[in-house]
Image (cartoon, rainbow, N blue to C red):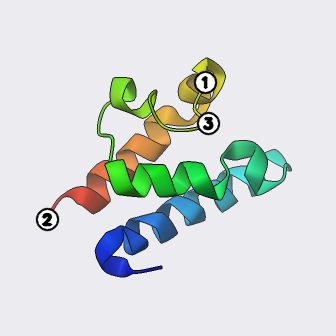
């Protein structure tokens, strides 16, 4: 993954996904698959409305995980 193309953010999102999956005792792909994380890293949604347009984000995942992922994106996207 090329860090210049969202690679560092992608890795941060993968870390969050792993933590959430470990806490829930579920496989990571149940939280979000890599395609969804890559879409987040490329598009960098900073609101829940923007996050809702990410591949693989439905209402349940938006409500359950949206805030946490948006917060990571905001922190990593800020220069």
Q: Nearer the viewer, mark 3 or mark 2?
A: 3
Residue 70 appears in the rendering: yes
Q: Residue at x 46, y 27 (%)?
A: 52
**Looking at the picture, how far across and down is residue 3, in whole percent?**
36, 79
Q: Which residue is mark 1?
A: 58
Question: In this rendering, is residue 62 above or below 46?
Answer: above
Q: Nearer the viewer, residue 32 or 43?
A: 43
Q: Which residue is mark 3?
A: 56
**Looking at the picture, how far across and down is residue 49, in whole percent?**
36, 23
Q: Nearer the viewer, mark 2 or mark 1?
A: 1
Q: In whole angstroms, how far apart are the C-alphas of marks 2 and 1?
A: 29 Å
Q: Quadrant of residue 56?
A: top right
Q: Residue at x 24, y 58 (%)?
A: 77
Picture disc at residue 79: 2
Q: Residue at x 47, y 45 (%)?
A: 69
Residue 23 appears in the rendering: no
Q: Nearer the viewer, residue 20 or 9?
A: 9
At mark 2, the secondary structure is: loop
| Mark 1 neighbour class, 10 Å CA radius: few under 14, some 14 to 19, many 20 or more | some
Is there a contact, CB below 8 Å, between mark 1 and mark 3?
A: yes
Q: Quadrant of residue 22?
A: bottom right
């Amino acid at each position: 993954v090329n860090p210049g193309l969202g690679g560092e953010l992608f890795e941060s999102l993968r870390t969050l996904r792993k933590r959430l999956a470990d806490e829930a005792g579920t496989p990571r792909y149940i939280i979000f698959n890599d395609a969804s994380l890559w879409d987040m890293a490329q598009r960098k949604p900073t609101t829940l409305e923007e996050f809702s347009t990410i591949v693989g984000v439905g209402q349940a995942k938006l409500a359950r995980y949206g805030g946490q992922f948006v917060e990571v994106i905001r922190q990593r996207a800020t220069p």
